Image (spheres, rainbow, N blue to C red):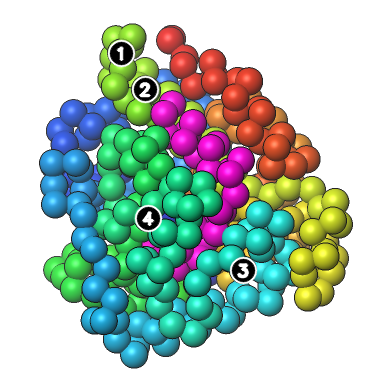
Amino acid sequence: MEEKIEPLLIFGFGNNVSTNGNLDMISQSIKYDYLFHNIKPNAIGGIKIFTKNDPYLKPQKYNDITNLENKLWTELYQNLEFLLDQYASREYLLGIRSLPIPNNMFPEFDAISPLIENSTGWQLTPVAGFVDEELFFELNKNRQFPVTDIIRRSPRFDEKYSGVTIQNDDGYTPEPDIFHDIQGHVPFLMNKEYADFLVEMGELGYETIKDKKGLGDDLVAHNLKRLQNFAWWTYEFGVIKNHTGTDVFRRVANDMDYEIYGAGIISSLDETKSVVACSKGDSNFSMFKPFDIEEIVMTRFDYSTIQDRYFVANSMEDIYSEFRDNKNLFRFEG
């Protein structure tokens, strides 16, 4: 697989532009990286990161959306629409159908957010771009999901990174865009169990970064990376077993052994096609491994290409319970 996909820099680590010196110091720590396996050089330079001390809020100006931006959204959405209808999980299908997320124009945050709030208490928080770890976790624990209004390949994306060499095309962007945020993540926020799970992830991340136990920067960084690994292999690039019951919500029955729930897969045409091809034996690029939370939290990843493995959970409920029963894995004390 040569074509890259959109990377999801969820509370990421790398040589990025941040005004928070303490977090930057934490993020550079590699003291305990020897404990991980599948270590990858994940640093991407030049990405703008917003902290709580920056003007990170950026309300959507829906009337300013251009025809080009609507066209870009339409192409991305419609290329994936029928694949996801056949292969995405029940939670995703019910969520996408209950929200005003159109397939032919930009979604409007103010139309979506009240419906999510009414369902699970979450709200969309429009932000200027990638937010740092502390802000990300603080928003999540308060049931606020950060979303950006910029879409890949758009002039606004190019303007944001004027003077910086940043890849910006169909298959790859250096930070999450509106398509990933809204089309990939937001439908799941309509599901109470999933929404509560994300709150707990936010609470744990915030607890970790505040370091009330006084573990120090190196252990904080290590535990954040463990949580990052878990998030990556679950709600970003996770699959569950196909128990066929979801077929009642599909136009065409799912003919592979898995259902997709990871937003990183859902928002990437190449990644979705790869999952399907590998599941059916038409490609051997990626392997499907049993869900093992101890292995997951210690496995790093490469966010610049198709994933070479997927951890298969029996159900979404099993993912939630495994996380809740094993929080000690994210509190390593050396």
Answer yes or no: do the residues labelled 1 and 3 have beta carbons within 8 Å?
A: no
The residue that mark 2 highlights is 207
276 displayed left or right of 171: right
Q: Earlier in the sequence, mark 3 or mark 2?
A: 3
The image position of residue 50, as x and y in percent, is 21, 48
Secondary structure state at the residue bearing disc 4: strand
What's the amino acid at mark 4? Leu
The residues bearing labels 3 and 2 have C-alpha atoms spaced at a distance of: 35 Å
Image vertical order of residue 116 relative to residue 112, above or below: above
The image position of residue 109, as x and y in percent, is 37, 66
For the question of whether residue 300 can be seen, the reply is no
For the question of whether residue 177 can be seen, the reply is yes
- The one nearer the camera, 290 or 37, is 290
Q: Earlier in the sequence, mark 3 or mark 4?
A: 3
The residue that mark 3 highlights is 97
- Other residues around mark 2 within 10 Å, as few (<14) / some (14–19) / many (≥20): some
Q: Earlier in the sequence, mark 2 or mark 1?
A: 2
- Residue lying at 66% horizontally and 63% vertically, measured from the top left: 93
Q: Is residue 274 magenta?
A: no
The residue that mark 1 highlights is 212
What's the amino acid at mark 1? Lys
The residues bearing labels 1 and 3 have C-alpha atoms spaced at a distance of: 42 Å
The residues bearing labels 2 and 4 have C-alpha atoms spaced at a distance of: 22 Å
* Residues in magenta, as a range: 176-204
The residues bearing labels 2 and 1 have C-alpha atoms spaced at a distance of: 7 Å
Q: Nearer the viewer, mark 3 or mark 2?
A: 3
Secondary structure state at the residue bearing disc 2: helix
The residue that mark 4 highlights is 124
